[in-house]
Amino acid sequence: MNFSQKYRIFYLIALLSVPVSIYFAITQSLWLWFILGFVYVKVLNFVALQIGLHRYFSHNSFKAKPMVRYGLAMSSVLTGHGSPVSWATHHLHHHKHSDQEADLHSPIHGFFHTILLWPVKTYDYFNINKDITPTPKHLVKDKLVMYIHKNYFLIWTMILLVSFSIGWKFALFFVLMPAGLSLLHGNIVTNYLSHVNLPGSYRNFNTSDQSWNNKWIQRFQWGEGLHNNHHKNMGAYNQAVMLHEFDIAAWVIDRYLKA
């Protein structure tokens, strides 16, 4: 099986872990495990997904300290979104074809397609890489990133073996469920809600797509709710452009992560 086929299987397992974790939380009163796992995935999304996979690996928008780069690369695996190579390739493809027919996960294809089905129906890293959007050169040259891509599922196998050796609760609530929640979070909040007009939505720029800023999403996501700003200038790690906007992820990058 190629990367895309293996990822589809992994994606379904990660998603199924969410209702399974809710079932055990209800039937075995494991709500503390569930809550702690939910808090953990919020932090994981903020660091590994928003800052790592998105701003650093996909857009190469800042230069990180060596240990920060290593930490972002390794923690990105835990989000379950695929390797930095595959995620960046899909994400840049989205920017190139945003809200057009070729866009893999635009709301124009339907609610369930965007929030749930697109990785199963259209996730094909190799076709995108070859025919539509080339893999960013800065990732191809990165030995650590390419190692993670080539060994992504071996790394996940080791993670699962170690986590289950610690205990099934740890494996479910701190490894599988966070990956599933991170996937749902990205599909629902970023891929769908940030491309529809909601209460609290506004646009600073008349871009050709349907990207929106949203003050409520900005607070919930800790920095990724300025989506219209991002689509106007995807290479900027600070997505705030107006006086009333604040990007906490950019503040963390400036204070702790930039080289």
Image (tube, rainbow, N blue to C red):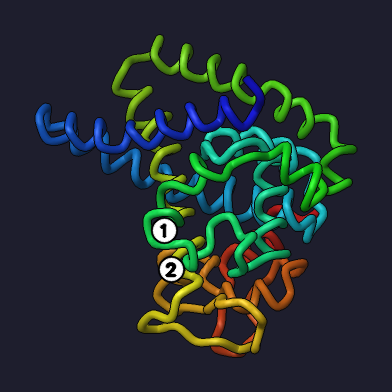
In the rendered view, tell whether residue 81 sits above or below residue 13.
Answer: below
Q: Label 1 is placed on what type of residue?
A: Ile
The residue lying at 53 percent from left, 34 percent from top is: 78
Q: Secondary structure at mark 2?
A: helix
Q: Give left or right: position of 44 versus 167.
A: right
The reply to whether callout 1 and callout 2 are in contact (CB within 8 Å) is yes
Tell me residue 118's x, y (percent): 49, 48
In the rendered view, tell whether residue 48 sits above or below residue 255.
Answer: above
The residue lying at 45 percent from left, 64 percent from top is: 192
The number of numbered badges drawn on the structure is 2
Image quadrant of residue 70? top right
State which quarter of the image contains the N terminus: top right
Q: Which mark is residue 188?
A: 1
**Which circle's residue, 1 or 2, is located before the other in the chain?**
1
Q: Label 2 is placed on what type of residue?
A: Leu
Residue that badge 2 annotates: 193
Image quadrant of residue 240? bottom right
Q: Give left or right: position of 136 versus 38.
A: right
Q: Secondary structure at mark 1?
A: helix
In the rendered view, tell whether residue 46 sits above or below residue 159.
Answer: below
